[in-house]
């Protein structure tokens, strides 16, 4: 097996195809903007990404809005709202959650899986670059 290199994007994209049609992966994700707990486990990366865009420093109004959106979204679709935090800002995340509440279940399943693919691809790229940097 060869050492990963900076030109592995096609291989990483192929790995992301494993998520196609996987509704179960969506049900196991933490609710966005909530602090980690036994009911809302988060990876270190997820916590850091959410914190970096301000999701852990919300005003009372923003917290109330996000909690309400998260609850409405989960009740409607049966899985948490999923978005690639690293590619968005706090305001955009709140707006997109509100907008996506008007989607159909099929559209949200597709969108949620696509967001998981983005998250996975960015995490894999970071791992490859970290591995390369440690070898240099």
Image: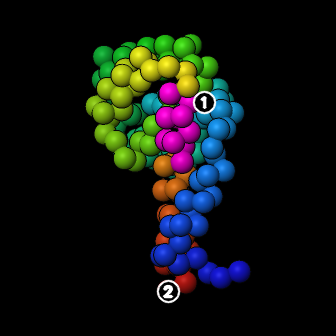
The residue carrying pointer 2 sits among few (fewer than 14), some (14 to 19) or many (20 or more) residues within 10 Å by Cα, namely: few
Q: Secondary structure at mark 2?
A: loop
58 with respect to 112 (left or right): left
95 with respect to 4 (left or right): left
Q: Residue at x 60, y 25 (%)?
A: 79
Q: Secondary structure at mark 1?
A: loop
> Which x, y percent locates residue 109?
56, 30
| Residue bearing mark 2 | 136
The one nearer the camera, 119 or 13, is 13
> Which x, y percent locates residue 21?
65, 38
The one nearer the camera, 40 or 21, is 21
Q: Is residue 36 visible?
A: no
Q: Which range of residues does the magenta coloring cover? A: 107-117
Q: Residue at x 36, y 28 (%)?
A: 96
Q: Residue at x 49, y 35 (%)?
A: 111
On screen, 39 above or below 132? above
On screen, 81 above or below 121? above
- Tag of residue 12: none
Q: Is residue 34 found inside the magenta-colored segment of the image?
A: no
> Which x, y percent locates residue 124?
55, 61
Q: On the rendered image, what quadrant is the N terminus found in?
A: bottom right
Magenta segment, principal secondary structure? helix
Q: Is residue 76 visible?
A: yes
The residue carrying pointer 1 sits among few (fewer than 14), some (14 to 19) or many (20 or more) residues within 10 Å by Cα, namely: few
Cα separation, mark 1 vs mark 2, equals 38 Å
| Residue bearing mark 1 | 40
23 with respect to 129 (left or right): right
On screen, 43 above or below 70? below
Sequence-first tag of 1 and 2: 1
Q: Residue at x 37, y 20 (%)?
A: 98
């Amino acid at each position: 097996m060869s050492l990963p290199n900076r030109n592995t994007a096609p291989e990483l994209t192929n790995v992301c195809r494993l998520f196609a049609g996987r509704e179960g992966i969506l049900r196991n994700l933490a609710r966005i903007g909530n602090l980690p707990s036994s009911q809302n486990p988060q990876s270190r990366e997820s916590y850091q990404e959410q914190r970096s865009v301000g999701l852990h420093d919300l005003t009372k109004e923003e917290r109330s809005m996000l909690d309400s959106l998260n609850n409405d979204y989960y009740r409607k679709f049966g899985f948490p709202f999923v978005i690639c935090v690293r590619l968005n800002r706090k305001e955009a995340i709140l707006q997109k959650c509100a907008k996506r509440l008007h989607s159909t279940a099929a559209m949200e399943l597709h969108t949620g899986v696509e967001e998981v693919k983005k998250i996975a691809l960015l995490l894999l790229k970071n791992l490859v670059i970290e591995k390369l940097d440690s070898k240099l």
